[in-house]
Amino acid sequence: MSLTDHAHLGDDATDDATVDATAVHRIIGEPATGRAGRQKASEVRPGSGVLVITRGPDSAGGQFLLADDVVAAGRHPDSAVFLDDVTVSRHHAEIRWLDDEYWIIDAGSLNGTYVNGTPVQSLPLTNGDQIQIGKFRLTFTCRPNDR
């Protein structure tokens, strides 16, 4: 699996945890703590993106490495970015590597996908973008050294 952290997030939709968004930039290039199946960030191709959960039910600080060309985000257990809350559609959005950029594409979700507070169908992502999927807020960061 190509994630730095693939935690199945809690079901308690009332307990929203928060993490300082400035901490997001510290994870880039740091190794993941060692569970089998994880990769160190330094082992991933340069320019790989990272999503960090900065707000969500029992989940602040969760990290997802975007090492594949297509990464699914949703409530389905097979989603690489697994967000377990009823406000998230089973197949909510995809993050795709297209034309040397990361794009977020809404997959027809019920509650929509937002970037920096604006609803989007598809949009190229830039460093520091805030993505809202259901009750979850994620910060997008791209490692230095373009892919």
Image: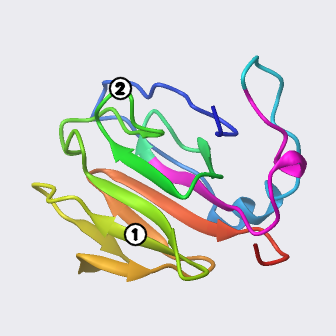
Q: Is residue 42 magenta?
A: yes
Q: Is residue 37 visible?
A: yes
Range of the magenta residues?
38-55
**In this picture, is 22 found above or below 137?**
below
**In this picture, is 34 found above or below 88?**
above
Q: Position of residue 24 (x, y in %)?
A: 70, 60
Left or right position of 141 against 147? left
Report helix, strand or loop for mark 2.
loop
Left or right position of 24 against 62? right
**In this picture, is 118 found above or below 12?**
below
Dot placed on the residue nearer the N-terminal end, 2 or 1: 2
The label on residue 77 is 2
Q: Is residue 56 magenta?
A: no
Quadrant position of residue 113: bottom left
Q: Outermost residue toward the top?
A: 36
Taking depth in this image into account, of 143 and 69 the one nearest to the observer is 69
Taking depth in this image into account, of 10 and 111 the one nearest to the observer is 111
Residue drawn at (55%, 64%), measured in percent from left and top?
A: 139
